[in-house]
Amino acid sequence: MRAALALVALAMLPSIAADRIAAGDAPQFRGDELVKPEGYDRWPLVGASIGLSYAESMEGSGPGAFHRVYINPSAYEAFRRTRSFPDGTTLVLEIRESAANVSIARGGYFEGKRTAIEASVKDSRRFSSGWAYFGFENGALATASANAEGRCHACHVKHGQIDSVFVQFYPNLRQ
Amino acid sequence: MRAALALVALAMLPSIAADRIAAGDAPQFRGDELVKPEGYDRWPLVGASIGLSYAESMEGSGPGAFHRVYINPSAYEAFRRTRSFPDGTTLVLEIRESAANVSIARGGYFEGKRTAIEASVKDSRRFSSGWAYFGFENGALATASANAEGRCHACHVKHGQIDSVFVQFYPNLRQ
């Protein structure tokens, strides 16, 4: 019995290891603070949107802001293979003003000035709820501490299609 | 004199070589047809837009379609260093329907179903005008022949901010 349990434990090891990103694109922490992800502009985009509010109500007029959401490459490959997010998954949200009426653009909107860089990180050991959310003041902060639990997580848990992530809005994860 | 010319020719070699992408992300041709770029969803995004028309006039109502424009990684690094596009630069345009009113999205638009994959390639040896433009019927075609010169190139030459490319709409190339 004890030997059988040991074998089961051994057999589980690879899958446990595979659920945690060890690659160079794993999130880096200084103490409790997340280091601002560098080079995420070279990561896979999972979705773009405009004027989309994660809140229950919308305010204001105009088209709203552009959102881009990126994922670190290791997590992208893992999710597309397994449909689950390994520990170390990092999603970066970049927000930009919408711009119009430039050059030949007579209608529609393209991305203007960047106004925010935010990130969410999955780490089941580090965060009791699995995920934490960070804001980098449009890149001015080199590190950031996690937002209070209520600020982002409650809505992500309630509305995120898979594991608190808004997969429903991200074509590259939906497919 | 002949020796001096030879030296000049030798000195020019590295820059000539650097102006042509030799990496694995260089465009592949079968005869005159461009092979559909694979894995471009892992390439850097240069810009997203909605309802933007490259034509002089807009038609229809509603927000229009989402455009994503990707660039092959070698060309991205080269352009950000030199502000010019090497031969072998490949830009992929992915078009998606706009979607709304799903889940918690009470306003705004996110990306729906993909409707087109197109590409432009720079190759000064292959194309007399430097660039050629290809459509892959939303991915149904494995290879595509270049569109007729007048269909895309005239507008790109006239309105593209740098070397027939609409850099003015692409934050990651503007910066």
Image (cartoon, coloured by chain):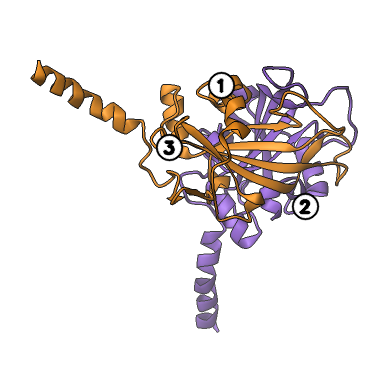
Chain colours: A orange, B purple
Identify the amino acid type marked 2.
Gln
Residue pointed to by mark 1: A174
Residue A124: give x, y in percent of width and height: 41, 32
Residue B137: give x, y in percent of width and height: 65, 23
- Residue at the top extreme of this rendering: A1
Residue pointed to by mark 2: B161
- Give left or right: position of A120 versus A127: right
Identify the amino acid type marked 1.
Arg
Label 1 crowding class (10 Å Cα cut-off): few <14, some 14-19, many 20+? some
Q: Residue at x 82, y 47 (%)?
A: B159
Q: How many marks?
A: 3
How far apart are the two marked residues, 3 and 2, measured between alpha carbons?
Answer: 35 Å
Q: Chain of mark 2?
A: B
Residue B31 visible, this angle: no
When asked about the image quadrant of residue A101, the answer is top right
Label 2 crowding class (10 Å Cα cut-off): few <14, some 14-19, many 20+? some
- Give left or right: position of B164 versus B139: right
Question: Could you tell me which quadrant the C terminus of chain A lies in?
Answer: top right
